[in-house]
Amino acid sequence: MPQCYFVAGTDTEVGKTYVTAALLASAANAGLKTAAVKPVASGCDCTHEGLRNADALLLQEAMTLDLPYQQVNPFPLEPAIAPHIAAMEAGKRLDVDRMVGICRGVISAGADLVLIEGAGGWRTPLGPRSFLSDLPRELDIPVILVVGMRLGCINHALLTAEAIRRDGLQLAGWVANFLSPVSMARPDENLATLKALLPAPLLGTLPFDEAADYRSAAEHLDLARMALN
């Protein structure tokens, strides 16, 4: 069985895809076969092949296994809005059981490392009574948390870590992602606070990169620090 992790974010627009792609690149640099799934993606473009999402395409590029787009992103949604609203407007149902089945198919496809990227924050709704956090719970996999380094991130990170633990899952590690050249005042002090308070190892600190080159970001990550039971 491969190592499998759910990549969550403290919020939307914190660089989950960038970090996920960097993690994939880091693993590939170590000689591992990799695969990724972004089950739900809103903000898709209409193409002659159907709806396509830039983040899912980036993951498809970064991983080493050759998987069809429909397996990487089984629930594409056109408007760049909350997934449950986009699905409701499109007359679609975001089915967690189907997501679980697709993810298990990817997990059994022969990779050494499989990353499943979330959408928005930990408790993103999929419908009236379901959340995207139900997916890693059903798969029973550990979580990697992407912390967007900006004002308010300490509160968001600690609350997310608490929710992950309450849901019975392990926080295997976290990544500090600096979102702009001046994303926050006192960056070193904020980083030190997060390292002291988050109950998981820091896997890497990604400096702001205007080019958003995930291959370069991979050099700042250390997957060997992952905390596993």
Image: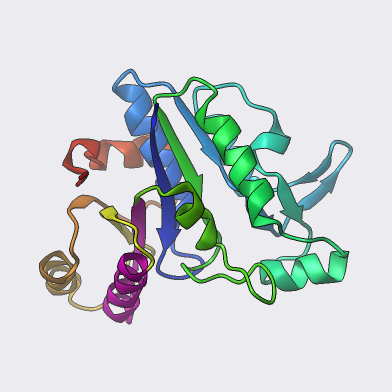
Q: Identify the residue at image location x=39%, y=24%.
A: 112
Residue closest to the eye, 2 or 194: 2
Q: What count of labels does the image hold?
A: 0
| Span highlighted in magenta in the image | 143-166
The coloring applied to the image is rainbow
For this view, does 31 lie left or right of residue 45?
A: left
> In this rendering, would 165 be left or right of 15?
left
Image quarter hosting the N terminus = top left
Q: Tell me where residue 170 sits by quadrant.
A: bottom left
Left or right position of 91 against 43: right
Residue 109, quarter of picture:
top right
> Is residue 20 at least partly visible in the picture?
yes
The residue lying toward the viewer, choosing from 217 and 200, is 200
Compared to residue 15, the image places residue 223 above or below, namely above
Residue 213 at least partly seen: no
- Where is 166 relative to 100, above or below? below
Magenta stretch: includes residue 141: no
Residue 177: x and y in percent read 33, 58
Q: Is residue 162 magenta?
A: yes
Q: Which residue: 61% across, 71% down?
A: 125
* Image quadrant occupied by the C terminus: top left
Q: Residue 106, how many percent across, how many down?
A: 56, 31
| Residue 86 location (% of width, % of height) | 77, 68
Find residue 51 and report its horizontal and vertical position in percent: 80, 47
62 sits left or right of 80 in the view: left
Q: Residue at x 59, y 46 (%)?
A: 100
Residue at the image point whose x is 68% and y is 47% from the top: 98
Residue 186 versus residue 45 in the image, above or below: below
